[in-house]
Amino acid sequence: MKIDVKNVTMIYSSGRKALSDVSFSLKSPEFVGILGPNGAGKSTLMKLMTAGLKETKGEILLDDKKLLDQEQKLKSRLGYLPQTFGLFDELTVWQFLDYMAALKGIKDKAEIEWAMEQTGLVDRRKIRVGNLSGGQKQRVGIAQAIMGHPELMILDEPTVGLDPEERVRFRNIFSEMSSERIVFLSTHIVDDVQAVCNRVLVIYGGSILFDGSPAGLIEQTVDHVGSYIRKVDDILPKDCEIVSKINTRNGVLTRIVAKELPDYVDRCEPSLEDAYLYCIHNSVKREDEHEG
Ligand SMILES: Nc1ncnc2c1ncn2[C@@H]1O[C@H](COP(=O)(O)OP(=O)(O)OP(=O)(O)O)[C@@H](O)[C@H]1O
Ligand SMILES: [Mg+2]
């Protein structure tokens, strides 16, 4: 399976431009994470890729043919976890999954059992969805997305609301599944991507800023990360972004990313978190320069 997003621009009827000229391709098998802050355009992109919205400009192809002309084919191969979804509160976990299986044309009940096992819902099967905790509801959402072992999994912030242990568990489930299919997952948690994705897209302001391996993103940040002890009234170096501040006996140990680090800053080995912030910082700076 292959998906090509070609020069896609999305402008909502309100006039809001959510994506501008976005292009990339996904090809089975791969595990791709899309990282971006709130409002970057992640959910909009995923809705377009699942035929829930129509792009304003450009096109999306599924195996070289227009995605929107093949909705049936898409639906039978797609597992989609939207960022927000309504569950039917009156149905039990099993009834809900059975209903979703029917919609997707999944006839094998073993798929429902398997999805419940993977998501730790087996002992909740008779509980009404409305009586589940937030994290358990999220697991039901994940269960319906992985059910049927779809060839394409599009997961919009799947780990939101899960406790750390569960997050790791689900990461591993997705990672295992990605060996035979496309898994495309959005997040703003860098750790989610670091641990498992072999490719990362960084999106900001509706544009893709980076598309490559996590190591490649880190590579372009070498010499742009530093730390120094900051005294109370020290001013911040120009054009830098603070990554973290830790109180120490001598002052505040401040970690920054910047295009040019001042001399008094000690160079640090960049992490993926640094690299992501630097990528966005650089893009914001460029915008400022255009405007100023
Ligand atoms: N239905 C809509 N009508 C108008 N504007 C919208 C609509 N949905 C989203 N937007 C706008 O499009 C932009 C991108 O939103 P989107 O939901 O795709 O971002 P996101 O990256 O998923 O953010 P988050 O991390 O908060 O989920 C935002 O500026 C948002 O306000
Ligand atoms: Mg979103």
Image (cartoon, rainbow, N blue to C red):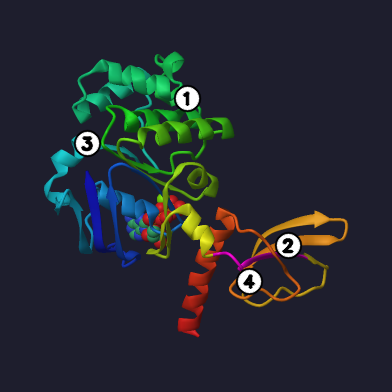
Give the percent coordinates (x, y) of residue 77.
22, 36
Dot 1 or dot 4: first in sequence order is: 1
Label 1 or label 4, whichever lies nearer to me, is 4
Dot 2 or dot 3: first in sequence order is: 3
Q: Quadrant of residue 127?
A: top left
Dot 2 or dot 4: first in sequence order is: 4
Q: Amino acid at mark 2?
A: Thr
Q: Is residue 240 above or below residue 292?
A: above
Q: Amino acid at mark 1?
A: Leu
| Residue 222 is covered by the magenta coloring | yes
Q: Is residue 88 above or below residue 198?
A: above
For the point 21% across and 30% down, which residue is it? 104
Q: Residues within 10 Å of mark 3 (few under 14, many from 20)?
A: some
Q: Nearer the viewer, residue 186 or 16?
A: 186
Region in magenta: 221-228
In the picture of the structure, the residue carrying the numbered disc 4 is 240
Instruction: Measure the alpha-carbon separation of dots 4 and 3.
Output: 45 Å
Dot 3 falls on a residue whose secondary structure is helix
In the picture of the structure, the residue carrying the numbered disc 2 is 254
Give the percent coordinates (x, y) of residue 250.
87, 60
Dot 1 falls on a residue whose secondary structure is loop
| Residue 187 is covered by the magenta coloring | no
- Is residue 4 shown left or right of residue 252? left
Dot 4 falls on a residue whose secondary structure is strand
Q: Nearer the viewer, residue 135 or 261?
A: 261
Instruction: Measure the alpha-carbon separation of dots 1 and 2.
Output: 42 Å
In the picture of the structure, the residue carrying the numbered disc 3 is 77
Which quadrant is the N terminus positioned in?
Answer: top left
Q: Amino acid at mark 4?
A: Cys
Dot 4 or dot 3: first in sequence order is: 3
Q: Nearer the viewer, residue 143 or 149?
A: 149
Q: Quadrant of residue 7?
A: bottom left
